[in-house]
Image: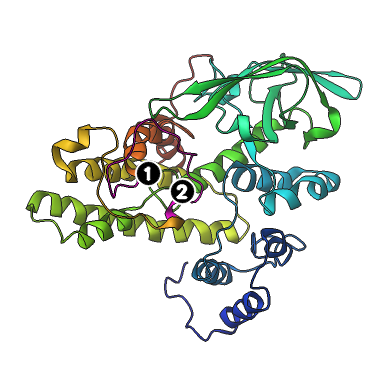
């Protein structure tokens, strides 16, 4: 059960973090991580073994102090998996720089012929002494051109059933034989890449967990991904939220059209349901349980909600919503941008318009595709939550 009434302003745990922040007015993210406040629910020395309520208190106090912890694939995807199955040497080598935000990571999972069905990946990793020789390609690698490391899933046993022949690796992004081709999406931003491996030699010490146990770790990563992608803002946890849009409408004198007002009210209701469900999911996660089918439920709801936020933002400005640079006039809170894809678009925004709006509208169709398509998420919900018959497997 989750208690939605957070402790009072004079709660000792709240006062303790306020004292720490007062004693460290210019704390670096490394110092905040060392204090255990980046992942407080983690075991020591990385966290402080905070229970769910303590975690939420810390979240509130850091937000109150305008401190934004690292976000993205490193801390949301890679770090939990390394903590789960990595060696002590891997934890000491990679976790500190992930938690401090020093290193950016990317995800090397999807392939041109293996997206929704990740178990069908064909990229090969062949053991050769103390290295693995990797050949193949990955696609939709977000931020790969800005990343120092990636998490790589490759096939190490081609003769095993497809779910049992995969292994999970830490992959430096500057290895000889790696080549990145940029993919420019319809927002005109360079956020994706296709990555090619041509006889890339990957040290065997970068294998996470046991060889051929990669599918289990991939599922853990994907569960954490769905939680991260369905948190906070409407663009996979980044960008403006329904509350931001409603605040801007109020600041502009409200909305006279009854249909648009009703749509705003509906968005508010959806965002509140998502917030409460997110707290339930967080509570389960902080108690040590790997996110399960409830993460798929949250992602399905969040993706559609994000698209509705962006569609309504466009509709609220009328016909000018068809023009590049348009959007509701008003400032999106700086915190809402945290973790957003770097925005480098053509054209100048309209006066008073934050570019996150027209970027978000163009990007929003991707919300129901990335991180597991809406159809795959519904299959998971149908089979694992509702107990419906499994979908036929054409390869069997």
Kindly identify which residue carries mark 1: 356
Which residue is located at x 48 percent, y 46 percent?
295
Query: Quick check: 381 left or right of 227?
Result: left
Q: Which quadrant of the view contains residue 120?
A: top right
Residue sitting nearer the eye, 130 or 312? 312
59 shown above or below 242: below
Which residue is located at x 50 percent, y 43 percent?
226
Position in image of residue 336 (x %, y %):
43, 54
Question: Does residue 388 show up?
Answer: no
Magenta portion: prevailing SS class? loop
Position in image of residue 314 (x %, y %):
23, 41
Residue found at the very far right of the displayed protein: 129
Query: Quick check: 278 left or right of 33?
Result: left
Specify the segment rendered in magenta: 336-355
Q: Distance between the residues labelled 1 and 2?
A: 29 Å
65 shown above or below 16: above
Within 10 Å of disc 1 (Cα), the crowding (few <14, some 14-19, many 20+) is many
Kindly identify which residue carries mark 2: 294
362 shown above or below 271: above
Question: Does residue 258 show up?
Answer: yes
Q: Which quadrant of the view contains residue 53?
A: bottom right
Label 1 vs label 2, nearer the camera: 1
- For residue 323: magenta? no
Number of disc labels: 2
N-terminal of the pair, mark 1 or mark 2, is 2
Q: Which numbered tag is attached to residue 378?
A: none
Determine whether the residue tagged by mark 2 lies in a helix, strand or loop.
helix
Q: Which quadrant of the view contains residue 272?
A: bottom left
Q: For the C terminus, which image quadrant?
A: top right
Residue sitting nearer the eye, 122 or 62? 62
């Amino acid at each position: 059960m989750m208690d939605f009434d957070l402790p009072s302003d004079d709660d000792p745990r709240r006062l303790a973090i306020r004292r720490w922040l007062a004693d460290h007015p210019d704390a670096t993210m490394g110092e905040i991580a060392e204090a255990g406040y980046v992942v407080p629910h983690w075991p020591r020395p990385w966290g402080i073994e905070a229970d769910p309520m303590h975690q939420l208190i810390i979240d509130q106090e850091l937000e109150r102090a305008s401190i934004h912890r690292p976000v993205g694939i490193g801390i949301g995807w890679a770090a939990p998996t390394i903590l789960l199955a990595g060696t002590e040497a891997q934890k000491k080598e990679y976790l500190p720089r992930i938690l401090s935000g020093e290193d950016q990571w990317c995800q090397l999972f999807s392939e041109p012929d293996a997206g929704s069905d990740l178990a069908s990946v064909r990229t090969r990793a062949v053991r050769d002494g103390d290295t693995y020789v990797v050949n193949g390609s990955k696609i939709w690698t977000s931020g790969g051109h800005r990343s120092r490391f990636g998490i790589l899933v490759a096939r190490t046993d081609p003769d095993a059933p497809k779910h049992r022949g995969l292994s999970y690796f830490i992959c430096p992004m500057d290895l000889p034989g790696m080549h990145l081709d940029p993919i420019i999406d319809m927002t005109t931003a360079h956020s994706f890449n296709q990555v090619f491996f041509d006889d890339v030699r990957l040290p065997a010490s970068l294998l996470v967990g046991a060889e051929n146990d990669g599918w289990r770790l991939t599922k853990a990563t994907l569960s954490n991904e769905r939680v991260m992608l369905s948190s906070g803002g409407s663009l996979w946890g980044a960008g403006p939220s329904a509350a931001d849009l409603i605040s801007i409408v109020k600041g502009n004198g409200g909305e006279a059209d009854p249909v648009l007002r009703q749509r705003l009210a509906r968005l508010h209701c959806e965002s509140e349901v998502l917030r409460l469900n997110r707290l339930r999911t967080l509570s389960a996660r902080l108690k040590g349980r790997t996110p399960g089918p409830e993460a798929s439920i949250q992602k399905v709801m969040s993706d559609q909600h994000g698209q509705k936020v962006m569609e309504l933002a466009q509709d609220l400005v009328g016909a000018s919503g068809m023009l590049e640079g348009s959007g509701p006039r008003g400032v999106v809170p700086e915190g809402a941008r945290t973790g957003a894809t770097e925005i480098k678009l053509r054209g100048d925004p309209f006066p008073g318009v934050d570019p996150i709006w027209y970027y978000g509208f163009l990007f929003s169709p991707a919300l129901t595709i990335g991180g597991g398509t809406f159809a795959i998420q519904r299959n998971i919900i149908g089979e694992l939550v509702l107990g419906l018959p499994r979908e036929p497997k054409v390869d069997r």
